[in-house]
Amino acid sequence: MIKQDAKKPAKELFLGIPADVVTNEEAKARIKAMLEEDRAHFIASVNPEICVAAQKNAELRRVLLSADMGTPDGVGIVLSSRLRGGRIRERVTGIDLMLELMDVAVEGKHPVFLYGAAEGVAEEAARNLQKSYPGLIIAGTHHGYVEPEEEPKIAELIARSGAEMVFVGTGSPRQEMFAARYGEATGAKVLMVVGGSFDVLSGRLQRAPKICQQLGLEWLYRLCQQPRRLQRSLVLPYFLLLSLRDRRLY
């Protein structure tokens, strides 16, 4: 087994896309440290679907390789790591890590911006978060239904808001592209992609029960809620097949 540089965060490769060997608590601690640095940091979410998509999308692949941290999101990532002798044992989902970071935001008085989802959803999510985390500063929100040429204006809006943490939920690969391209322009210190988390946080979509999450069946629960996700769910077995063919971990 190839040894990694002890000074660098441990990572594993999934179809050439790196995911950090971290738990939720470790990811939270690393992002807390990032907030002390005077630059933008991009936090990607590495799951089977995005790893497969990056095989055909060179720009997405480049963006994922540029991330400051790639969290191991998805039961397929954990399973692939186990089967190939890796060390990833815990899913670090966007919504779970985002909620962990709310305490960091309150404690450090780091203003938060929510960008994504349908009109009104981010605002509802923000209100619910402020109820759950008293003292949370919401710098602003904006829906994700914008044209690509409008994104520089979104970055300017975030910069004017004074946000230090930006959660982007515009769907892949748009959310990854935005965080990587406009991170510096936003003036924020951390930009993290969170997929459909705002729909859950707003109360418009119910999250899977804890038992489903623990058993790695959250994808099946979401499929029952949103049957249109069937094609996306079929990526999992294809990903596992490809990743087991490619035995490279590092």
Image (cartoon, helix red, strand yellow):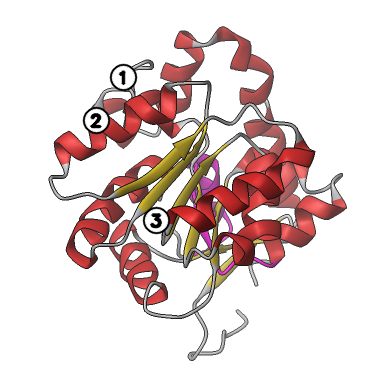
- Which element is circle 3 on? loop
First along the sequence among labels 1 and 2: 2
Q: Are marks 1 and 2 in contact (CB under 8 Å)?
A: yes
Q: Please name the amino acid that badge 1 sits on.
A: Gly
Q: Secondary structure at mark 2?
A: helix
Specify few, some or many for label 1: CA neighbours under 10 Å numbering under 14, 14-19, or 20 or more. Answer: few
**Camera-nearest residue between 215 and 92:** 92
Of circles 1 and 2, which is in front? 2
In the rendered image, residue 76 lying in the magenta stretch gets the answer yes
Residue stretch in magenta: 66-86
Give the spatial CA distance, label 1 vs label 2: 9 Å
The part of the image, by quadrant, that contains residue 123 is: top left
Name the amino acid type tagged 2. Asn
Q: Is residue 73 left or right of residue 149?
A: left
Mark 1–mark 3 Cα distance, whole angstroms, equals 29 Å
Judge depth for marks 1 and 3 and give the one in front.
1
- Mark 3 sits on what residue? 89
Residue at image location 34% in from the left, 30% down from the top: 125
Q: Magenta span has 163?
A: no
Q: Residue furthest front?
A: 160
* Sequence-first disc among 1 and 3: 3
- Of labels 2 and 3, earlier in sequence is 3
* Contact flag, marks 1 and 3 (Cβ < 8 Å): no
Query: What percent of the width, then of the height, locates residue 9?
Result: 49, 78
Q: Amino acid at mark 3?
A: Arg
Q: In the rendered structure, are the residues bearing label 2 and label 3 in contact, judged by CB atoms less than 8 Å apart?
A: no
Q: Is residue 180 above or below residue 30?
A: above
Q: Which residue is at 45% across, 10% downward?
A: 225
Q: Nearer the viewer, residue 239 or 84?
A: 239
Residue bearing mark 1: 203
Mark in front: 2 vs 3: 2
Q: What residue is disc 2 on?
A: 128
